[in-house]
Amino acid sequence: MRRTKLIWFALGAGVTAIIAVFAKQFAPAPAQPETAILELIEPERLGAQDNVRDADMIANATGDLARNCGAKFFETTFLYNDHSPTTEIALVPANKKAVDCILAETAKRAIQANIIYRKASNAQTH
């Protein structure tokens, strides 16, 4: 009698564990929040189509602008086949003053700025 109870108890625990694993596998993943990002597109250097230097492959001008305006969190991207280098500044309260400064300077320097939305990630910021 005692062995029968233990067998049923073990079977119940096993079935419960298997169902929990299957439920976890097929449950939808929690939605990640979207982050608003200010994207600054690096201006092209005149005559750069024929002679691309290493310095032209990174976001120097926009990265310096973000740094000089005091941006706390930003990333720079490299030159890809399909787009110019960019600087991406997270639109968070810590960057408010820097973003105001950056937007004023981009208007003066004719730097293209976009606001994009991206799923939050654990990317390292500078």
Image: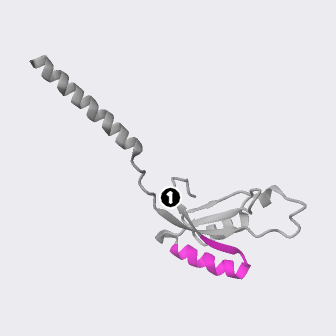
Quarter of the image where one finds residue 70: bottom right
Residue at figure coordinates x 60%, y 78% from the top left: 101
Residue 91, percent from left and from top:
52, 69
| Residue closest to the far left | 1
Considering the image in quadrants, where does the N terminus appear? top left
Residue at figure coordinates x 68%, y 81% from the top left: 107
Amino acid found under the numbered disc labelled 1: Ala
Query: Which one is in front, 8 or 108?
Result: 8
Residue 54, percent from left and from top:
80, 55
Residue 50, percent from left and from top:
90, 61
Considering the image in quadrants, where does the C terminus appear? bottom right
Residue 60, percent from left and from top:
72, 63
Q: Is 78 placed above or below 98 here?
A: above
Number of residues whose C-alpha sits closer than 10 Å to that of mark 1, classed few (under 14), some (14–19) or many (20 or more): few
Q: Does the magenta stretch include residue 110?
A: yes
Element carrying mark 1: loop
Residue at figure coordinates x 86%, y 64% from the top left: 48
Q: Is residue 28 magenta?
A: no
Q: Is 97 placed above or below 36 here?
A: below
Q: Mark 1 points at which residue?
A: 120
Query: Which one is in front, 67 or 9?
Result: 9
Residue at figure coordinates x 23%, y 26% from the top left: 11
Quarter of the image where one finds residue 83: bottom right
Number of disc labels: 1
> Which residues fall within the magenta stretch?
96-115
